[in-house]
Image (tube, helix red, strand yellow):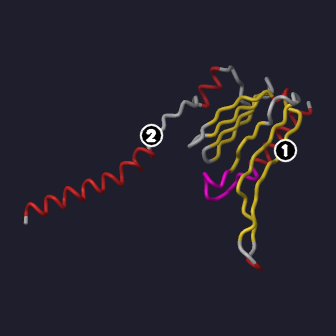
Amino acid sequence: MIHSESVNLMVSFFLVVGIALPFAFNKFNLFNHSSTPNFQDYIERNHLKITKIEKWKNHQIGFDSVQNKLLYQRLGNYPELSLIDLNEIKKISIHEHRHVSGNGISKYEVTDYLGVKLQYYDLNHPAKMLEFYDEKLSPSMTSERSIATKWLSVLQEQIKN
């Protein structure tokens, strides 16, 4: 009987550890050490003077009004850190994907993706998409639309000058 209890205890222990360990690794980011540099370190290394900055969920965006450069960072499964010279940008627009869900009177639109699209003067340079929201990575949109709209306005003002 004692042998059976110790086996059950050991099985329970390993079951709990087996379930909890992936969550612990994910929480402390031990599985994917990102090669994406730290936002603040990147600012210092590139001698940027960020005059406007915003953080939300796993994103950051900053603007250097002196050098007219935009710094964008996305963390998570697909990390990205981009420095964009706004003097090379011809057009900026909101880019959004939606789908209709439900039927009849309970139809509603769901945003799948929201980003700001930067198009370069150089036609050989592909457009740059700055993700503000992706439903696959975050189940609910909170303030992303207002953040994207605000930054669209800020950036459009910069490319006019």
Residue 159: x and y in percent read 88, 33
The magenta segment is 134-147
38 left or right, relative to 113: left
Q: Which mark is residue 30?
A: none
* Residue holding disc 2: 31
Which is more toward the observer, 123 or 141?
Answer: 123
Q: Residues within 10 Å of mark 2 (few under 14, many from 20)?
A: few
From the image, give the main secondary structure of the stretch colored magenta.
Answer: loop
* Residue holding disc 1: 93
44 left or right, relative to 66: left
Q: Is residue 37 magenta?
A: no
Q: Secondary structure at mark 1?
A: strand
Q: Quadrant of residue 5?
A: bottom left
Residue at the spot x=65%, y=55% of the render? 135
- Residue placed furthest toward the right: 160
Residue 22: x and y in percent read 40, 48
Q: Quadrant of the N terminus?
A: bottom left
